[in-house]
């Protein structure tokens, strides 16, 4: 970036710090992000999808307002993974993130206790007409559109699962916006975190009757990231009653999660059974053709005409990543073109791709494993990278480390750096898991329904099947 852009970014950072306060800025923004201005966009690089999603879900509005106050323009804010940022995060910061996530419902309840009611619903950004359809997501899009149009077969609930950045939230918000436009339909979109916060607030303020009246009388309930309810027994019980109340009168529920409902750890069997009683559909990673369509659509959205040969190169090299990675690479290409005063051609595209593939391809693979491990055992990615050593967290962490060494080209040192550990910890974890796999030892972890005991090979088989790698570790 040039000097003017660098100064503008510094001012935006200062304004964000003012809006978030010193604690949240230090934990989530200071050493965890890199801000880049490019062609009417503010790109926020993050060390991993978990941090990116947390910032987007919790601080997006504050960041957008800070950028507007400094630039006096409405910038499009995009999030992109940059592996090199991982080394800037200290152990104390990783622990702080885990603690912040764990305590967030109570923290929100304390802040909301001063308000007459929880915050009002915010406008949703995703629209079905903006969703790029390909073979990887066609079934999910068709099912979501059927609910939005209210004229197709009824599947209740509709559960959409897939990795980070593949369009689950976009589809869910698109359904919400379509139903809102129709009018006369009481539809509510919330994240699993928001549902939890609303419930905790209702309990602490003795307003559970109002909470239940609001949720149980809905025509359509859209819940994003339902896996957030893992390890929250009281919230799961409340959601089960909410689910039954809505379903019993023929109303609709749509859910999204990072993994298949059966693989969400620390989720009660009653909820898993309810989720499986409807339609479960996966959004897969985009193939080259879908990637090209996405890139073309994103480029048109910022009035850029990218040559077909450049789109073909990007789509081929970035196939089977995710939408955020595609958008991040496109914005980086545009920014590099502006800084170097060069046209966007194959040479410039190869330069961007060589840098990104060398730096981020292993991380994308690792974060798939990390997200799966966290969801499977009902913990957060932040807890995996923290210093917590509870039985469940330690088991999940060891399995993630072993899978990362088996299914990526990351070294023990690199895996350790990504998880806030040293390479010795990774080596010991892998040795421990290898021994357990050899003997097919039963392992134990805690869930809201009590302790679970399962052979280690069956766990690896399920997780590897979800990753699309067969059963190579357990074979």
Image (cartoon, grey):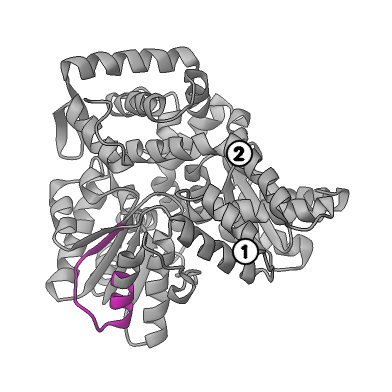
Secondary structure at badge 2 equals: loop
What residue sits 15% from the left and 64% below the top?
244
Neighbours of disc 1 within 10 Å: few (<14), some (14-19), many (20+): few
User: Which of the two residues, 401 or 453, is positioned nearer the viewer here?
Assistant: 401
Tell me where residue 255 sits by quadrant.
bottom left
Left or right of 231? Residue 415 is right
Image vertical order of residue 362 relative to residue 187, above or below? above
Question: Residue 58 at what x, y percent from top left?
Answer: 51, 54
Question: Residue 356 at what x, y percent from top left?
Answer: 61, 41
Left or right of 452? Residue 143 is right
Neighbours of disc 2 within 10 Å: few (<14), some (14-19), many (20+): many
Tell me where residue 37 sits by quadrant.
bottom right
What residue sits 77% from the left and 54% below the top?
337
Question: Which residue has dot 2 on it?
Answer: 32
Question: Which residue has dot 1 on it?
Answer: 308
Part of the protein shown in magenta:
143-160
Q: Quadrant of the C terminus?
A: top left
N-terminal of the pair, mark 2 or mark 1, is 2
What residue sits 68% from the left and 50% below the top?
349
User: Is residue 77 visible to us here?
Assistant: no
Q: CA distance from mark 2 to mark 1?
A: 35 Å
Secondary structure at badge 1 equals: helix
Residue 133 included in the magenta stretch of the image: no
Left or right of 430? Residue 55 is right
Q: Does the CB distance between marks 2 and 1 fall below 8 Å?
A: no
Image vertical order of residue 422 relative to residue 268, above or below? above
Question: Residue 77 at what x, y percent from top left?
Answer: 62, 59
What is the count of numbered marks? 2
């Amino acid at each position: 970036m040039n000097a003017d852009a660098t100064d503008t970014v510094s001012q935006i950072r200062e304004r964000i710090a003012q809006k978030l306060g010193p604690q949240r800025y230090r934990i989530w923004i200071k050493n965890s992000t890199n801000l880049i201005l490019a062609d009417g966009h503010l790109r926020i690089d993050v060390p991993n999808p978990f941090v990116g999603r947390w910032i987007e879900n919790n601080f997006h509005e504050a960041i957008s307002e800070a950028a507007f106050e400094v630039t006096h323009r409405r910038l499009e804010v995009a999030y992109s993974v940059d592996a090199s940022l991982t080394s800037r995060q200290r152990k104390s910061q990783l622990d702080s993130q885990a603690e912040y996530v764990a305590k967030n419902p109570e923290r929100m309840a304390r802040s909301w206790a001063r308000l007459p009611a929880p915050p009002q619903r915010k406008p949703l950004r995703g629209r079905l007409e903006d969703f790029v359809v390909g073979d990887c997501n066609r079934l999910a899009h068709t099912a979501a559109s059927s609910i939005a149009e209210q004229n197709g077969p009824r599947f209740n609930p509709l559960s959409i699962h897939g990795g980070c950045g593949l369009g689950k939230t976009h589809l869910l918000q698109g359904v919400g916006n379509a139903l809102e436009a129709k009018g006369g339909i009481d539809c509510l979109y919330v994240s699993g975190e928001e549902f939890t916060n609303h419930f905790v607030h209702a309990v602490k303020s003795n307003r559970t009757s109002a909470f239940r009246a609001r949720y149980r009388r809905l025509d359509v309930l859209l819940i994003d990231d339902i896996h957030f309810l893992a390890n929250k027994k009281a919230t799961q019980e409340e959601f089960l009653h909410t689910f039954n109340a809505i379903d019993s009168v023929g109303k609709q529920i749509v859910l999204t999660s990072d993994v298949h409902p059966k693989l969400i750890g620390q989720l009660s069997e009653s909820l898993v059974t309810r989720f499986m009683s409807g339609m479960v559909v996966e959004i897969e990673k985009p193939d080259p053709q879908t990637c090209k369509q996405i890139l073309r659509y994103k480029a048109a959205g910022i009035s850029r005409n990218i040559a077909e040969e450049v789109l073909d190169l990007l789509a081929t090299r970035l196939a089977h990543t995710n939408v955020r990675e595609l958008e991040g690479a496109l914005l980086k290409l545009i920014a590099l073109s502006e800084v170097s005063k060069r046209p966007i051609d194959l040479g410039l595209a190869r330069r961007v791709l060589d840098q990104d593939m060398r730096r981020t391809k292993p991380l994308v693979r690792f974060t798939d494993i990390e997200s799966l491990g966290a969801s499977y055992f009902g913990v957060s990615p932040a807890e995996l990278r923290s210093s917590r050593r509870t039985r469940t967290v330690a088991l999940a962490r060891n399995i993630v480390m072993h899978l990362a060494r088996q299914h990526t080209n990351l070294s023990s040192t690199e895996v350790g750096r990504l998880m806030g550990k040293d390479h010795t910890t990774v080596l010991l974890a892998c040795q421990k898991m290898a021994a357990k796999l050899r003997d097919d030892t039963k392992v134990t972890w805690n869930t809201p329904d009590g302790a679970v005991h399962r052979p280690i090979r069956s766990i690896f088989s399920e997780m590897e099947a979800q990753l699309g790698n067969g059963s190579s570790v357990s074979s």
